[in-house]
Image (spheres, rainbow, N blue to C red):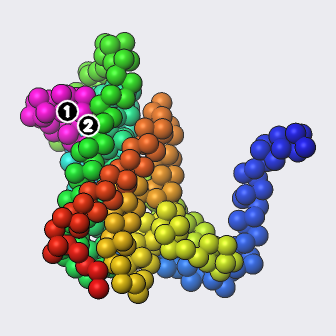
Amino acid sequence: MHIFIIKLRRNFFAILFLMFSVCLLLFSKNNLPAIKNGLTLWATSVVPSLFPFFVATELLMHTNIVNFFKRIFSSFMRPIFNVNGEGAFGFIMGLISGYPVGAKIACEFRKNNICSKEECERLLSFTNNSGPLFIVGTVGISMFGSTTIGLLLLVTHVLASLTVGYIFRFWKKSSDVNTSSQIRPKKQKQIENLVCFNNLGEVMSEAINNSVKTVIMIGGFVVVFSSIISILKASGLVDNVYILGLLEITNGISAISSLHVKNISFGIVFSAFLLGFGGISILLQVWSIISKSDLSIKPYIYGKLLHGIISAFYTFIAIWFFPFLNFNL
């Protein structure tokens, strides 16, 4: 029995991927429309909303904007979040752009030694967030049919993100003394990489290439998880919209908003959790982004679970204390 368990662990992913391949064939009738819908979602929503931000972020990393953020926000970021002032750039861009821009910036900071390993892991815990366009426009207006719901979810989402950032200021705090002297050994290289008229074409080409790779990677995850959700529904293994929402937030929140139940507020609170947590799909996207760095995925996992719980709590409190936010029928 012990030998069997060892072999099962050793071949777990081989068995899992084989089962996935078999299910693709068995449930191909349901998978094909799901894959088409996933590709449509990627082409019509993900690419237009994220690709320009990826390019803009890559270009901004070749300017002095990061140092500008350091000068402006150092007095704010260090005492509250225990990270350099440059971290404000990652938080603001991650909040404006949405998943997974914040994680990408944290990795770029680590790659260029702008922040220490511990600081970048702290940034991972709270800078990778849902964007306001998605929360207010897609979730609030399109799915729930209410701007008020969208604004409520946005406010609680941002407040929860700031709360998680403050909590994670203590992440590996004892290691800061040992690593502070290792930051910025590549300062001269950063100066050489600043964009100017001589290297503008090269910088733009690099920014576009990197952005294309990232957005295609995201598209792959969207398609794969569209297939997984389709298989789970068709096989009858999992048909609970709340569980499916943990896999992929867009499909999950859309299904929750379509439920014909009287207790709408419960759906709003759970949607707040999903927006904060991000789902398994986003988790794997972030994992793939940081896989080439020395950053740990643990602070991201802990941070997003905490973000989801705190977002749901703040949303529940707001609905409880402010009657005009109670949407129960």
Q: Position of residue 83 (x, y in %)?
A: 25, 29
**On screen, 17 above or below 73?**
below
Q: Residues within 10 Å of mark 2 (few under 14, many from 20)?
A: some
Segment tinted magenta in the rendering: 65-91
> SS for tag 2?
helix
Q: Quadrant of residue 19?
A: bottom right
Task: Indicate whether 236 appears above or below 260.
Answer: above
Query: Is residue 245 at all visible to an observer of this figure?
Result: yes
Look at the image and tell me whether residue 42 can be seen: no
Does the stretch in magenta take in 31?
A: no
Q: Which SS does the magenta portion mostly show?
A: helix
Dot 1 corresponds to which residue? 80
Q: Image height check: is 286 above or below 292?
A: below
- Answer yes or no: do the residues labelled 1 and 2 have beta carbons within 8 Å? yes
- Quarter of the image for residue 26 reads bottom right
Q: CA distance from mark 1 to mark 2?
A: 6 Å
Q: Is residue 49 left or right of residue 31?
A: left
Residue 303: x %, y % from top left: 39, 43
How packed mark 1 is, by other alpha carbons closer than 10 Å (few <14, some 14-19, many 20 or more), is some
Viewer-nearest residue: 146 or 314 = 314
Image location of residue 209, percent across then percent down: 39, 52
Q: Which residue is drawn at the image coordinates 32% and 13% (left, top)?
A: 177
Which residue type carries mark 2?
Answer: Tyr
Which element type, helix, strand or loop, lies under badge 1? helix
What numbered label is drawn on residue 2? none
Tag 2 residue: 166
Give the residue displayed 43% in from the left and 38% down from the top.
299
- Location of the N terminus (image quadrant): top right
Work out whether mark 1 precedes mark 2 in sequence or the reverse, and give the earlier one. Answer: 1
Hey, what amino acid is under mark 1? Ile
Q: Which residue is found at the position 46% from the left and 45% from the top?
A: 301
Name the quadrant containing residue 278: bottom left
